Image: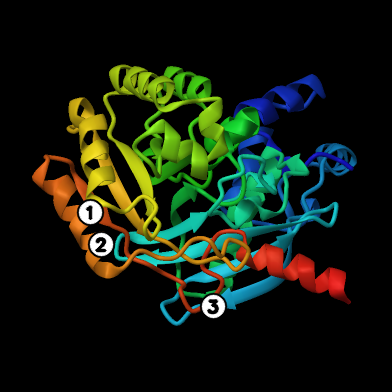
Amino acid sequence: MKPSIYSLTMEQLTEWLLEKGQKKYRAQQIWDWLYKKRVTTFSDMKNINKDCLELLEEHFDIELLKESVKQESADGTIKFLFQLPDGNLIETVLMSFSYGLSVCVTTQVGCNIGCSFCASGILRKSRDLNSGEIVGQIMKVQQFLDARGKDERVSHIVVMGIGEPFDNYSNLMNFLRVVNDPKGLAIGARHITVSTSGLAQKIRDFADEELQVNLALSLHAPNDELRTEIMKINKAFPIEKLMAALDYYLEKNNRRVTIEYILLKDVNDHEKEALELAKLLHNKRHLTYVNLIPYNPVSEHIQYERSEKKSILAFYDTLKKNGIQCGIRHEQGTDIDAACGQLRSKQIKKTKAV
């Protein structure tokens, strides 16, 4: 298959065109057609000469992902199941907030991190997405918004879909540079959040990029014994190593990091864990924010239940009393397949049953 034109950053596109004997300014023209006018065929690029169009047609694919399923929630959340060129399925979610429209993108087909509570890891990773396939998710959602005719645009991105973004690092970085480019989609770096389950060395690498992109760390437990029980990645990157990488990131970037913490009934939602978490984050309390997340039950993980409301509030109160900035995440899309990976898993099972 030809590589996607959406895989290229502006710099890469410019270099490629120069190598092919084209003028440098062609890159900006093509970029404008792709990300401002959002054409779907190379032939629609009216001010591009015939030779250049033929080169683009010969070397690149402009086709985007195919929409397989679309679920719409009463609260406005829309979950898309997209089919990749090789037939694999991925999920992308559009969410509406007071501050704008946010899209949650997927970076891998399946996931090998193996968090015991997560729907994304039910189906093992088969491959990484290339950067064009990640950008393609944003483009498909933006085309959907264009078709609604309300002058809407994707203003925020969270890289929290299926897969571990830092396990697909180079494609992730290319994606970030494409969507952040001020001459294209121009989605501000501070409006983009990348979530990791805790690949310590990649957190350090990300710190060295010195981007304004936000970082979120999926912690979910305050000690090694409990975290290893629910997140096997902790065997490779125990909390001490993870906190050291986080310290490096904070020192290098001085940017607040969100600590994601899913509350599981009678597993990690006691006062004991809240106090441990407060102690763990004490010396980082001014540059961390704990996002408490009510659990979305997954049928394959029947050992876990959502924490009771009183337990969630008690956990929150304990953190606040110990000087930790925190909040309880507002839930969206609970009337559809809310947990990341659920829709994909159901669709694959349905296909196999036919």
Helix, strand or loop at mark 3: strand
Residue 25 visible: no
Image quarter hosting the N terminus: top right
Q: Is residue 303 above or below residue 189?
A: below
**What residue sits right under mark 1 in the picture?**
315
Mark 2–mark 3 Cα distance, whole angstroms, equals: 30 Å
Q: Is residue 325 left or right of residue 223?
A: left
**What residue sits right under mark 2 in the picture?**
311
Helix, strand or loop at mark 1: helix
Task: Tell me the crowding category of disc 3: few under 14, some 14 to 19, or many 20 or more residues within 10 angstroms, Cα based.
Answer: some
Mark on residue 75?
none
The kind of residue on which mark 3 rests is Glu
Mark on residue 72?
3
The kind of residue on which mark 2 rests is Ser
Q: Is residue 126 left or right of residue 165?
A: right
Mark 1–mark 3 Cα distance, whole angstroms, equals: 32 Å
Image quarter hosting the C terminus: bottom right
Q: Out of 324 and 48, give the one closest to the viewer.
A: 324
